[in-house]
Amino acid sequence: MKAVSADRQMVRAAMAAPYLERDEEHALAVRWKDNHDQAALHKITMSHMRLVISMASKFRNFGLPLNDLIQEGHVGLLQAAARFEPDREVRFSTYATWWIRASVQDYILRNWSIVRGGTSSGQKSLFFNLRRLRARMAQADPDLPDSAIHSQIANALGVHAKDVAVMAARLSGSDSSLDAPVADGESGASSERMDFLRSEAPLPDEQVSTMIDEERRHSWLGNALDTLNPRELRIIRERRLAEDGATLESLGESLGISKERVRQIETRALEKLRTVLMRETPEIAGL
């Protein structure tokens, strides 16, 4: 109750604040910019709080508390005051309008849903204009199908019709928790939505089978590598088994041979490995 009373007092104070004449507004803006005069800043912002309230009220249909929207609009007002250049001969209200609207819209996008959306300028425009445009088109032609409405809105806002359909679906629903209970109509038992999500992970028997196959292949490769001489083994390890394979040139420099000779040794070593694997473990051909 105290919070509501304080908010009402803030609104009353904003509405009671006098308008500023151009010369007075300019003088206050200069005092704030040059001297960081807090009294000047307070007078400028209080005289424009009715603009914040008016702007915030335009977004009250998005389901967020009006008081929170006003607070965010006030943040935008302060940002405008910090960046305002009084010598440009522009009224502060004209300059501040953009900052107030941007601050309120960003707050709505952050808090309207737990799923982040509307990150691009086109998506933001779609989020804030979709309902208005759809209502206007439906009023003009009640029999117009959704596909045609989405196409017209896409053309008007410069986005894809698919994006319009996705945003329309988001705006028509609400967030649902995966922990929310779902009743079973037959048994009366209660489960959670998460219980019905299909896992993309392999089944336990598939995981065990994959692990066994990997161990077998690792053992086969280890036995085959034992047949290589030290130089062949080094080249294969650094060229084929390392995460960042060494170049022929770098290996040639470290071994004191040409890169062409490194390539020949590598080719011979690979052929030797292939021969040993096929001879000792013929079942590898099926893997």
Image: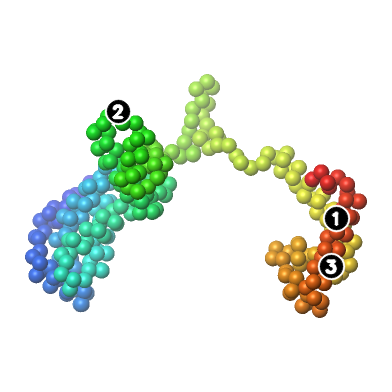
Residue type at the position of mark 2? Asp
Of callouts 2 and 3, the N-terminal one: 2
Marks 1 and 3 sit apart, C-alpha to C-alpha, by 14 Å
Q: Amino acid at mark 3?
A: Ile
Separation of residues labelled 1 and 2 (CA atoms):
70 Å
Which structural element holds mark 2? loop
276 vs 86: above or below = above
First along the sequence among labels 1 and 3: 3
Question: Mark 2 to mark 3: distance in Å?
Answer: 76 Å
Q: Is residue 193 visible?
A: yes
Question: What label sits on residue 265 in the rendered view?
Answer: 3
Q: Is residue 74 visible?
A: no
Pinpoint residue 94: horizontal percent, then vertical percent: 18, 61
Q: Could you tell me if the residues under marks 2 and 3 are in contact, i.e. CB atoms within 8 Å?
A: no
Residue occupying the point 40% across, 49% down: 117
Question: Could you tell me residue 178's position as x and y percent?
Answer: 49, 39
Q: Quadrant of residue 236?
A: bottom right
Q: Is residue 71 left or right of residue 145?
A: left
**What is the secondary structure assignment of the residue under circle 3?**
helix
Figure check: 16 above or below 253: above
Q: Circle 2 sits on which residue?
A: 143
Image location (x, y in percent) of residue 16:
10, 56
Mark 1 or 2 closer to N-term? 2
Rendering coords of residue 166 (x, y %): 41, 41
Q: Which mark is residue 274?
A: 1
Placement of the C terminus among the 4 image quadrants: top right
Q: CB of mark 1 within 8 Å of CB of mark 2?
A: no
Q: Residue at x 82, y 65 (%)?
A: 266
Q: Which residue is outermost to the top?
A: 186
